Image (spheres, rainbow, N blue to C red):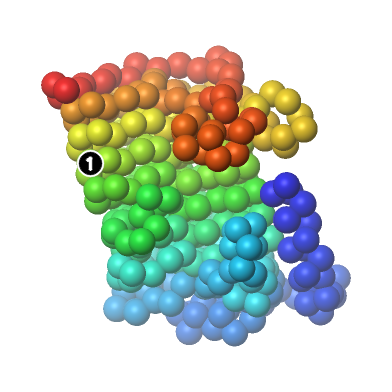
Amino acid sequence: MKRLTCIMLVLVMMMGAMALAEGDAPIEISTVEELAAINDNLSGNYVLTADIDLGGVEWTPIGAYAPSGESEEEQEIPSAETAFTGTFDGQGHTISNLVINQPEAWAQGLFGCAANAQVGNFTLENATVDAQLMGADVVGYAYCSTVSSVTLKNGRVTAHAGEMSGEGMYGGIVGAGMGSMIENCAAQADIVLPDGTANAGIVGGGLEMTSVVGCAATGTVTAGSNCYGLGGVSGCGFAAEQFTDCTAENVTITTGDNCFWIGGITGYAGGYPDAQYGMPVTVFTNCTAKNVTVNAGANADGIGDIVGSGFYNEQVAQANGAPFDQPTQYELVDCATDMSEEKSAA
């Protein structure tokens, strides 16, 4: 179903994309002002030609999330009018000193919302983002997009409680991912969550039908009580096809009480083997959790070296029936770990 909605979004944007004729030169970006002006042409093809320092800049994310309609499915599909729908090639340059302080806002990051877009090939250094939902240093919400070859150095994402905190979705590279690909990215970041929030990891936060390939994470995830979906690389990988060649190294995950689904690579993941549901069984291949420590509070549950758990929620099962009446399934192939785990007394 999500793949069909990706196709729908592509069709909606086709007329605009036709304006960029084959052979047109990409738009060069070399200053803060030119980077900010991408918001005036969200479907453009951009290349970064110089390092950019955002120090002292009140940054407005490139692309904003707005739902394409009122139904539950349309709420997941961002409007093509407000999201970044183009390409951004950083050409190996560095963007530094990003600060976003929007504790009540959704989809915050250098790029707020990217839809059917390609973003990559740059370093983001010294980035601090405060957001309520879908927060990340690089891309707050990646929908049917590819985020590749991004290195995050000294990143920090702080979540703030709000009406949708139970969904959460916070990460260094991508906060929320739907039908996307995160590949060849490396993140060194600290992710901080208050009570009652969820889906957080150092590379990606809440990922659905989003694969992660060749990514590495180092840093910390620090959560309050009553949180779930916490991982070294990602908070979750629901219905993702693959996590391949991913590494969490020198990672510490610390939680308050009553937290669950905590993993060295991801908190929870998987799909259903029946092809009719369109939710693939997630395969973890050659993933490593090295020097990963989990310090969990009282009543912790679902802690795993690579994956904390499959997804199963009794309320969701009762409301929807099959396939949600059974836990999601995942497969581990050639994965390794030396993860240590400490729990306080229940």
Would you place residue 64 above or below residue 343 in this image? below
Q: Secondary structure at mark 1?
A: loop
Percent coordinates x, y for residue 75 in the rendering: 59, 63
Would you place residue 122 above or below residue 149 in this image? below
Question: Residue reaching furthest front?
Answer: 318
Percent coordinates x, y for residue 197 in the rendering: 33, 48
Percent coordinates x, y for residue 151 in the rendering: 46, 50
Percent coordinates x, y for residue 9 in the rendering: 74, 63
Residue type, label 1:
Ser
Instruction: For residue 272, say whether it is visible.
Output: yes
The quarter in which the C terminus is drawn is top left
Residue at 27%, 27% in the rendered image: 300
Residue 141 horizontal side relative to residue 12, left or right: left
Residue 264 horizontal side relative to residue 316, left or right: left
Residue at 46%, 64% in the rendered image: 107
Among the 4 quarters of the image, the one containing residue 320: top right
Label 1 belongs to which residue?
225
Among the 4 quarters of the image, the one containing residue 22: bottom right
Observer-nearest of 139 and 71: 71
